[in-house]
Amino acid sequence: DAGVTQSPTHLIKTRGQQVTLRCSPKSGHDTVSWYQQALGQGPQFIFQYYEEEERQRGNFPDRFSGHQFPNYSSELNVNALLLGDSALYLCASSFLLQGSETQYFGPGTRLLVL
Amino acid sequence: GENVEQHPSTLSVQEGDSAVIKCTYSDSASNYFPWYKQELGKGPQLIIDIRSNVGEKKDQRIAVTLNKTAKHFSLHITETQPEDSAVYFCAASWNYGGSQGNLIFGKGTKLSVKP
């Protein structure tokens, strides 16, 4: 059973560019959450997708947008990249069972903005 | 909003000793508290979690305790081994529209186990 997968593993962009990161959830999971992890910090919640809609959103500007596809995979898009967007971007998938939901993380995409 | 504080930021123990990491949370509505282990270059891996209707949970060498009144929870690792060396994160979450809300993470504890 494959876990959460993310692509690409590493990415280098320049300021002002746009980037798209991809995530495939764990088999049987229908919810995808995205987190940003700066170096030496804990992950920070960006947003969560369920049934192809954004269900929750953290304190991130609207330069950060996402999408969920019918097969539950998801994309994170960041426009007008800033140096401060350099971070590890983590995708987590989950499935609601009897009122509880456990998030499982992928390996992340490391983004460097120059 | 919810805030999670984690201590200590670094912890060094001798192989075979116990390690304890403590977290406090601010929002009494939080009801789910997972712990993640993150090794260098990898994503966080869930190691144990606890819900607010339980005071303690154990899985082999790892245990978590929760004190809802004081709003704090702790991770206990016994008989530590070098492979336990990693960064450990605590997190808190709450019910959101019938599902689980997003996770709020602490800043992490870097655990080093010396052989």
Image (cartoon, helix red, strand yellow):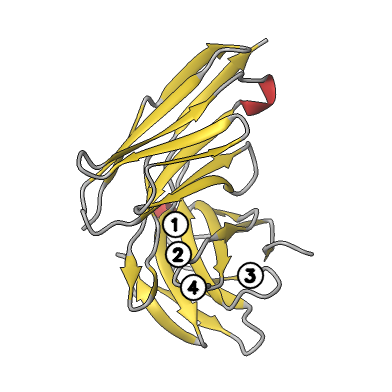
Q: Is residue A113 visible?
A: no
Image coords of residue A21 (percent x, y): 60, 69
- In three-dimensional space, the C-alpha distance between marks 4 and 2, rounded to whole angstroms, equals 40 Å
Q: Which badge, 3 or 4, comes first in the chain's sequence?
A: 3
Is the residue under label 3 in contact with that under label 1 (CB below 8 Å)? Answer: no
Which one is in front, B61 or B103? B61
Q: Residue B82 or A22: which is nearer the viewer?
A: B82
Marked residue nearer the N-terminal end (2 or 3): 3
Query: Mark 2, chain letter?
Result: A
Q: CA distance from mark 3 to mark 4?
A: 25 Å
Q: Quick check: marks 2 and 1 in contact, CB under 8 Å?
A: yes
Within 10 Å of the Cα at label 2, are there few (<14), some (14-19), or many (20+) other Cα atoms?
many
Label 2 belongs to which residue?
A: A81
Q: Secondary structure at mark 4?
A: loop
Amino acid under disc 1: Asp
Q: Nearer the viewer, mark 1 or mark 4?
A: 4
According to the image, label 3 marks what residue? A23
Disc 4 designates what residue? A98
The Cα–Cα distance between marks 2 and 3, rounded to whole angstroms, is 20 Å
Badge 1 and badge 4 both on one subunit: yes
Residue to which mark 1 is pinned: A85
Q: Chain of mark 3?
A: A
State how far apart marks 2 and 1 are (Cα).
6 Å
The mark that comes first in sequence, 1 or 4, is 1
Closer to the chain start, of discs 4 and 2, is 2
Image check: B56 left or right of B70? Answer: right
Q: Tag 3's secondary structure?
A: strand
Crowding near the residue tagged with mark 1, few <14, some 14–19, many ≥20 C-alpha atoms within 10 Å: some
Q: Position of residue B14 (x, y in %)?
A: 58, 9
Give the chain letter at badge 1.
A
